[in-house]
Amino acid sequence: MNPVALNLAPALWAVEFAATLAFALSGLMEASRKQLDAVGVVVVAGLAAFGGGTLRDVLLDRRPFFWVEHPHYVWGIFVLTAGAMLFMRQRHMKPTARGIVWPDALGLGLFAASGTLLSLDAGLTPLVAVLMGVITATFGGVLRDIVCNEIPTAFRDHRPYALCAFAGGWVVVAVRAAGGDETAALALGTVVAFALRALALWRNWRVPAWQTD
Amino acid sequence: MNPVALNLAPALWAVEFAATLAFALSGLMEASRKQLDAVGVVVVAGLAAFGGGTLRDVLLDRRPFFWVEHPHYVWGIFVLTAGAMLFMRQRHMKPTARGIVWPDALGLGLFAASGTLLSLDAGLTPLVAVLMGVITATFGGVLRDIVCNEIPTAFRDHRPYALCAFAGGWVVVAVRAAGGDETAALALGTVVAFALRALALWRNWRVPAWQTD
Amino acid sequence: MNPVALNLAPALWAVEFAATLAFALSGLMEASRKQLDAVGVVVVAGLAAFGGGTLRDVLLDRRPFFWVEHPHYVWGIFVLTAGAMLFMRQRHMKPTARGIVWPDALGLGLFAASGTLLSLDAGLTPLVAVLMGVITATFGGVLRDIVCNEIPTAFRDHRPYALCAFAGGWVVVAVRAAGGDETAALALGTVVAFALRALALWRNWRVPAWQTD
């Protein structure tokens, strides 16, 4: 969630902003399905938006968190929640869910790539760095679902999501190993994860299930 | 949960003790409803009592935790659990639930105020410090509910709880900004959060729901 | 989960390996019951295997984690998951569940002992060190169950599990207090916790329930 230490190109900032919004909206909609009160809606939206990067930073022992350094993002969650509760109705849910698929997929790529890059820079081995990228990209949604008392979607919906982040992370590793700079690693990792996610949705790819019978 | 670094006035120590007891009892009663075994009862009581302060300290990267520095509080949880399992019966549950409302509300105020104060002293911005106060005051209950496989009460019961902590935290910020000392900030923040919680219960205030239809 | 800093005797390394495998298998089987996809299966197996030690290290502020320092264990989880999904069928589940009882009990002992020992070395008081041992030994399973949307088995199945780890931790404390070396503490703590767990299963001991009526 926080490629903050990096000097992102403006295009990546725009992607980050759209993706954070998409993640927060996914939290808002799950909170609404669960009929949470305003406090619950804010918390779940915030978890969805910042939970992945925060968990990564706890695991890496990095401080400050993104939202601690940039508290206006927290205000943004408050404003977004208030706006949604005032103006968003049942009939807006489906179009919103459809509308956030693409920024969500961009965020999946960007946060996987930036999480991997930060972890490589912190001296982690490639596999662990890639896992940290996957955690950055997907554990906001995992925490959102745990708080809402659901088995996390990322673990059971059989659509490639974390796997696309995983692939994007390895692209970052490869670009860095080949001597590419941070911006190239970030851009390529994001694009590959996004493209895989897009392909997976378009071609209806399935994550293998465990056929126990 | 742990205003330990602060030199609390004796009155505040009494509040802290009563509040920790109330938080632990809330865990005991939820564990009993879920028919947990003795291990589960201890864990859920301990989470309810110390989980909020511990999570705050993990987020702030502060050590030692309150219960690490004061292990007699952990023994207290053991003794309390044993006592409850020996002597507390179904007919005691309702009176206990009623009886802990006020010490719980005091704890809500004290832990929100002390969490905010510690976070301000750690150099956090006001909003984030207030959030840390809210986490201190409310996430023990949140973790208790997650372990018991419930959507956290604080996010769905439509009664102001975290919001009162939030208000109390801002009082601490304001008192400190106005040059007040730590004791004044702590006392005023506690009183305001407590008073709001009491008012909310008395007047049956509701946290806004999201009317999606 | 990670008695890594210690120079384990080869016998203990064998125990650790078998126990980690047993913990991972417990995660695999729960993931299969919940019909998770391949991503969920890997995550739940990894949480069951490494979650307890990781949580302990987060609480102790220790880095690197076991699986960060030894990423081949993560590859091992991947390979194990792939193997299980390819070859493990419904009819293998019951024998596997029976087969892992003993390595799981050994792991309970070893991880409780090693977690306690590490925490004592980190300067914690005995009670807290023992709790860290219990967390090391049992919270992998707790996190596995939370992610799978269940109340943790360790808190509700009324069979002594965490209590055996607790006893083993105190053995480590006693051996160290009596001047015994690390290997003696580790071996004795492991053996006592394992023996208690074996006795508990054999004699069908029950953790006290809370009779609220």
Image: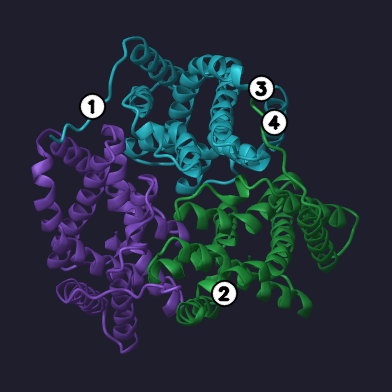
Chain colours: A purple, B cyan, C green
Q: Nearer the viewer, residue B179 or A168?
A: A168
The residue that disc 4 covers is: B76
Q: Which mark is residue B208?
A: 1
Q: Give the SS element for disc 2.
A: helix
Q: Nearer the viewer, residue A137 or C79?
A: C79
User: Is the same chain shared between marks 2 and 4?
Assistant: no
Type of amino acid under label 4: Gly
Q: Give the SS element for disc 3.
A: loop
Q: Nearer the viewer, residue C54 or C83?
A: C83
Horizontal and vertical percent position of residue B30: 53, 32
Look at discs 2 and 1 and give the one toward the viewer. Answer: 2
The residue that disc 3 covers is: B88
Q: Do residues under tags 3 and 4 come within 8 Å of each other at their CB atoms?
A: no
Type of amino acid under label 1: Pro
**Of the image marks 1 and 4, the number of the one nearer the N terminus:** 4
Horizontal and vertical percent position of residue C179: 90, 58
Say which residue appears at 17% left-offset and 56% top-offset: A17
What crowding class fits label 4: few (fewer than 14 Cα within 10 Å), some (14-19), or many (20 or more)?
some
What crowding class fits label 1: few (fewer than 14 Cα within 10 Å), some (14-19), or many (20 or more)?
some
Mark 3–mark 4 Cα distance, whole angstroms, equals 16 Å
Q: Mark 1 falls within which chain?
A: B
Look at discs 1 and 4 and give the one toward the viewer. Answer: 1
